[in-house]
Image: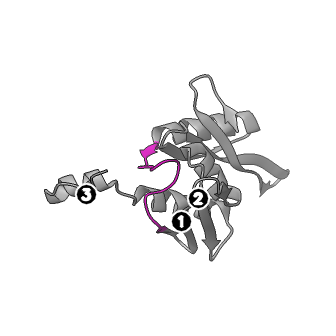
Amino acid sequence: MEQNELGMVEKIVSLNRVAKVVKGGRRFSFSALVVVGDGKGSVGFGLGKAQEVPEALRKATERARKSMIRIPLIEGTLPYEVLGIYGAGRVMLKPASRGTGIIAGGAVRAVMEAVGVSDVLTKAIGTNNPHNVLRATVQGLASLRASEDVGEMRGKKLFTPRK
């Protein structure tokens, strides 16, 4: 987990060397997939392509910062179970009890660490392509709604039990 000067968490999900065959031989370029989060419920991702790795990473990070979304969290986990879908990628995200940790791999783990989730159960279904798994994860998180927002939208008051 790498933190930059603004206190943002930056995670490299995938770094790929791409070859283009031309008359004189092969031309290489790089594509980088990066996740950026504040560790407090905001996350974004970006794809950067360039001739050099540092430039690709810079572009990806810039795009990730611009695409940040807010996610409602409850005590370090998700409010309810959700299924994120993008292309062939499906990612099941399930809230977990305190102390469980992040049970996830690859792209999903990077997103969960960046957003600040400390306890979650996940399963990537259908594909392990990091691009589609990442987009499915973010789509699932973006579909989460806080109970206060839903109550406000419906014009209802939330029930709070007496202690």
Give the x, y percent position of residue 54.
Answer: 73, 34
Q: CA distance from mark 3 to mark 1?
A: 20 Å
Residue 35 lies in what quarter of the image?
A: top right
Amino acid type, mark 3: Val
Residue beneath disc 2 = 120
Give the x, y percent position of residue 55.
Answer: 68, 34
Q: CA distance from mark 2 to mark 3?
A: 23 Å
Residue beneath disc 3 = 150
Amino acid type, mark 2: Val
Residues marked 2 and 1 touching at CB (< 8 Å): yes
Q: Which residues are magenta?
A: 67-82
Residue shown at 15% from the left, 57% from the top: 156
Q: Earlier in the sequence, mark 2 or mark 3?
A: 2
**Up-down relation of residue 59 to residue 151 (above or below):** above
Q: CA distance from mark 2 to mark 1?
A: 6 Å
Residue beneath disc 1 = 94
Give the x, y percent position of residue 124.
Answer: 63, 69
Image mark for residue 148? none
